[in-house]
Image (spheres, rainbow, N blue to C red):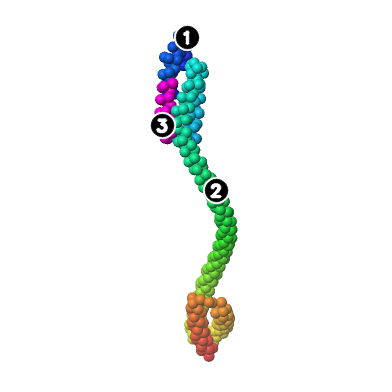
Amino acid sequence: MEGSGEAVDRTLLNHLLKMFTGLGIYAESFEKKLLECASEFNAAEGMKYMLQSDAPDYLKHVETRLQEELERCLIYLDASTRKPLIATAEKQLLERHIPAILGKLYEYQFNMGLLLVEKKDWNSKYIELSQNLVEVKDALEREKATHLIALSKAEKGEENLRKALGVEKECVFDLEKVLREMRSENANIKFTAYSKLAEANALIATIEEKSLEVEAKLRSADAKFAEISRKTSEIDRKSQDLEAQESTLRRERLSFIAEQKEKDLEEAHNNIDVTNETLTGKEDDVNIRIANITL
């Protein structure tokens, strides 16, 4: 049958059925068998769909099937077939299944009621969850604001620490620079002290040489007394220079002691003291020699 999904040439059927009508055999030869087949087909289809469909879907299927039967009646079936064909379809698809349809409708309505109640419960829960969500969002926003404030404070603290570290590094750099300058000044003072000590030693050597010359010239007595007097004056002048140098060295030593803060500078101070003692001893020796020469 066409209702089972098989392809049917409706134009050919229309011509063939008109021929049956013209021959007067349409009702006996075709319509009776058509109604029997339609009844069996709709009964089987009704049972099938009733088992696997709910009431709304089944009624929708019945409406579609009745519309198809009506369409066939209009296209190629005789007009007298419409009423019994539609009645057969309604009987097999509707009348014999009315109790089952009503039962499914009641069940459907009951389920719909349950769904409505459940929907109401879910709406209440949704409203409650929405309110809770709003509260959670507010709490989250407050927590976020608190976190941002704490983060800002932490960043400021970190920035302050970085600035303090920068200042500390600058202080360390300045201290290292001052220390290098002090060491350099120390080295210069040591070098100056050693240079002056070398000059003093050279001067003492010169005085000793002159003393030897004076001793050699004493053998000439009166003839070379004037030369001795001159040498004596020169020695006196050099002695005064030595005293002046000694005074300068003492002042530098005092200044050096006041400025030194490290162990290396103290050692330089000790070296200067030793040099002064050496110079003093040598000066005393020179003075003794000069006294001896004068006598």
Give the x, y percent position of residue 27: 45, 15
Between circles 3 and 1, the one closer to the viewer is 1
| Residue mark closest to the camera, 3 vs 2 | 3
Dot 3 or dot 1, earlier in sequence? 1
Q: Position of residue 295 (x, y in %)?
A: 53, 90
Residue carrying label 1: 22
Magenta stretch bounds = 35-52
> For this rendering, which residue is in front, 83 or 276?
83
Q: Is residue 210 magenta?
A: no
Quadrant hosting residue 147: bottom right
Foreground residue, 251 or 45?
45
What residue is rendered at 56% in x and 80% in y? 254
Amino acid type at mark 1:
Gly
Circle 1/circle 2 CB separation < 8 Å: no
**Residue placed at 50% from the left, 84% from the top?**
277
Residue 151 versus residue 89 in the image, above or below: below
Q: Position of residue 276 (x, y in %)?
A: 51, 82
- Residue 130 picture location, percent across and down: 56, 52
Q: Amino acid at mark 2?
A: Lys
Q: CA distance from mark 3 to mark 1?
A: 38 Å
Q: Which of the two discs, 1 and 2, labels the residue nearer the N terminus?
A: 1
- Label 2 Cα crowd, 10 Å radius (few <14 / some 14-19 / many 20+): few
Cα separation between marks 3 and 2? 35 Å
Element carrying mark 1: helix
Label 3 crowd bin: few (<14), some (14–19), many (20+), radius 10 Å: few
Mark number, residue 120: 2
- Reading the image, the residue beneath label 3 is 48
The residue sitting at 47% across, 38% down in the picture is: 103
SS at mark 2? Answer: helix
What's the residue at 45%, 9% (across, down)?
Answer: 23
Can you say whether 76 is above or below 219 in the image?
above
